[in-house]
């Protein structure tokens, strides 16, 4: 479980997040929605310990305490000589990847690539992947070893409809495993209804939080679509 | 080492090795290149991945300033390591600290440090040239085989091995952090630590290579091998191998050219490396043309 209390993030005198309260229950899928600039990625950065903040973030781990993460943007130089297999091996072996990948890691990486629907991508240059393929490679990186907390920052953007369903099946499987809590940013309200246990509407402060049916009322969809950035 | 140089010279006298091997300074220079080329060439792809090319240029300039400081403080011109190491480490750590805490783009900050360091170095050079012939200072700026001593070789070997071992242990973390800080963070990589660690390793490797390559040209040694390798490499493994191969070929080739034409070794090595870059660029072009089929053209 992750418990966020009074979280405030300020930069250059401007508040990006203000007194945010959020609890991600163990084994639940918790979605964050909100307009652009609402502070969703900032919240993730705080949870990851990448930025300074005031308030508290408490983790109540039951197992490894591992955090998996899929960033919103991951730009790879198209000419970078790094294969998908090498990229995934970077955090799975101590031996320098530039000197080769061990047999066990190689087998493990192939397995997780199959899991995310990229079975033949081991030797493909990372820079040659399309946006959707790259998202899936990042998801593969995030879900193995099984994380206790999975942070997904708009992971379905750039995915086609089949890939979105495949992704949602992966999330469902993680939920069934029981040990992984998912905190995810999404702009797809249909997706929120399909997979979320709880939803939080964030716009620098927490506007609403609760079950999808409580939060996703008619005016919310209009507000998000209209880009007004304000939902009462 | 004297016995070794005599043995090599005897091989040269018998015609087993080229004539130039009769000279101990050339053998020392060659040994230096055989040590520094894999070291700097191997580091070059991480320098490029971490976007430290301009930073490396600034370190070269800082080395020149460090040399001037060392001499002003009484160190010998041929071994002013105290001044060079001291000033380069200070400049490198300060640059990283400011980069991590300021909101300006890193190349702008490095530009400020480079100018400051160069300004200080030039002012101090006035003092240095009162005590030494300008040609002796040129050797440090452009590299010279004549100035390499056995002590320099021992230092290069010791620091080279230490840097290589630490790099091997930290390699995956360094590359992951270079790709994305947040991805590195969730894998347990402390970005600030690897940032400082890598620039310290780079600084050490650059300083011990200055005698052969020269302060003004050492940047090329940590950028061009990776650039040349990138034209052909498809995997990180081949990227590393081709970077080292480029640095070694250019180092050895440049050394022979330098001794034949009596030009500074640094200049000759960098020219050879640049030539290899264009060769790999041409090869990449040929490969692209040969591999272009209707199916791959439309790939996406």
Image (cartoon, coloured by chain):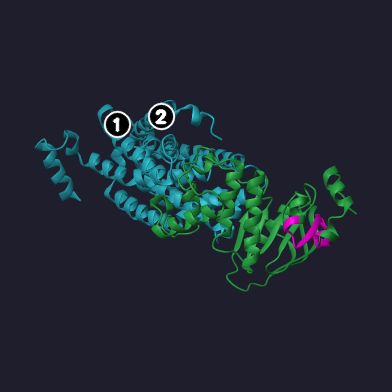
Chain colours: A green, B cyan
Q: Residues within 10 Å of mark 2 (few under 14, many from 20)?
A: few
Q: Position of residue B34 (x, y in %)?
A: 29, 44
Quadrant showing the C terminus of chain B: top right
Q: Nearer the viewer, residue B266 or B37?
A: B37
SS for callout 2:
helix
Q: Residue at x 15, y 50 (%)?
A: B3
**Residue identifier under label 1:** B258
Whether A37 is drawn above or below B135: the answer is below
Do tag 1 and tag 2 residues touch (Cβ < 8 Å)?
Answer: no
Q: Nearer the viewer, mark 1 or mark 2?
A: 2
Q: Residues within 10 Å of mark 1 (few under 14, many from 20)?
A: some
Q: Position of residue B91 (x, y in %)?
A: 53, 48
Q: Which residues are magenta?
A: A194-212
Q: Looking at the magenta stretch, what is its main secondary structure? A: strand
Whether B24 is drawn above or below B261: the answer is below
Residue A203 within the magenta-colored segment of the rendering: yes
**Residue identifier under label 2:** B287
Q: Nearer the viewer, residue B228 or A104?
A: A104
* Earlier residue among tags 1 and 2: 1
Whether A175 is drawn above or below B112: the answer is below
Chain ID at mark 2: B
Q: Is residue A41 left or right of residue B253?
A: right
CA–CA distance in space, label 1 to label 2: 33 Å
Chain ID at mark 1: B
Q: Position of residue B102 (x, y in %)?
A: 66, 48
Q: Is residue B20 left or right of residue B133?
A: left
The answer, for residue B199, to whether it is visible in the render is no
């Amino acid at each position: 479980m992750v418990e966020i209390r009074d979280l405030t993030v300020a930069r250059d005198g401007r508040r990006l997040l203000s007194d945010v309260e959020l609890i991600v229950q163990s084994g639940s899928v918790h979605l964050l929605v909100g307009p652009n600039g609402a502070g969703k990625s900032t919240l993730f950065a705080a949870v990851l310990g990448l930025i300074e903040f005031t308030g508290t973030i408490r983790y109540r781990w039951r197992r490894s305490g591992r955090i998996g993460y899929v960033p919103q943007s991951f730009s790879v130089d198209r000419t970078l000589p790094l294969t998908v297999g090498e990229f995934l091996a970077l955090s799975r072996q101590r031996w320098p990847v530039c000197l080769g990948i061990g047999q066990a890691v190689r087998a493990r990486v192939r397995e997780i690539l199959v899991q995310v629907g990229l079975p033949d991508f081991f030797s493909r240059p990372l820079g040659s992947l399309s946006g959707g393929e790259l998202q899936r490679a990042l998801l593969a990186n995030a879900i193995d070893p099984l994380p206790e907390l999975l942070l997904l920052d708009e992971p379905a953007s750039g995915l086609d409809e089949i890939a979105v369903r495949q992704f949602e099946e992966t999330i469902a499987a993680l939920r069934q495993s029981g040990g992984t809590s998912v905190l995810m940013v999404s702009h797809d309200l249909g997706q929120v209804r399909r997979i979320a246990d709880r939803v939080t509407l964030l716009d620098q402060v927490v506007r609403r939080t609760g079950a999808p049916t409580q939060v996703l009322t008619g005016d919310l969809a209009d507000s998000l679509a209209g880009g007004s950035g304000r939902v009462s | 080492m004297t016995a070794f140089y005599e043995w090599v010279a005897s091989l040269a006298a018998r015609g087993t090795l080229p004539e130039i091997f009769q000279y101990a300074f050339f053998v020392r220079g060659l040994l230096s290149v055989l040590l520094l080329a894999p070291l700097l060439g191997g580091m070059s792809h991480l320098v490029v991945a971490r976007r430290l090319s301009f930073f490396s240029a600034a370190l070269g300039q800082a080395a020149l300033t460090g040399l001037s400081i060392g001499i002003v403080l009484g160190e010998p011109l041929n071994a002013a390591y105290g001044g060079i190491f001291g000033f380069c480490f200070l400049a490198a750590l300060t640059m990283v600290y400011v980069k991590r805490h300021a909101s300006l783009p890193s190349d702008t900050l490095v530009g400020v440090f480079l100018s400051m360091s160069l300004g200080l170095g030039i002012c101090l050079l006035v003092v240095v040239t009162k005590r030494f012939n300008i040609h002796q200072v040129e050797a440090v700026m452009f590299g010279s085989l004549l100035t390499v001593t056995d002590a320099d070789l021992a230092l290069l070997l010791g620091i080279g091995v230490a840097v290589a071992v630490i790099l091997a242990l930290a390699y995956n973390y360094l590359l992951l952090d270079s790709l994305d800080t947040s991805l590195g963070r969730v894998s347990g990589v402390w970005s600030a630590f690897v940032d400082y660690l890598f620039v310290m390793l780079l600084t050490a490797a650059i300083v011990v290579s200055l005698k052969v390559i020269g302060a003004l040209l050492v940047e090329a040694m940590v950028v061009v091998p990776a650039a040349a390798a990138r034209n052909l490499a498809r995997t990180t493994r081949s990227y590393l191998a081709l970077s080292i191969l480029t640095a070694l070929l250019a180092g050895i080739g440049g050394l022979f050219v330098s001794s034949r034409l009596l030009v500074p070794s640094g200049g000759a090595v960098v020219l050879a490396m640049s030539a290899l870059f264009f060769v790999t660029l041409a090869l990449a072009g040929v490969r692209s043309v040969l591999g272009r089929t209707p199916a791959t053209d439309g790939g996406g």
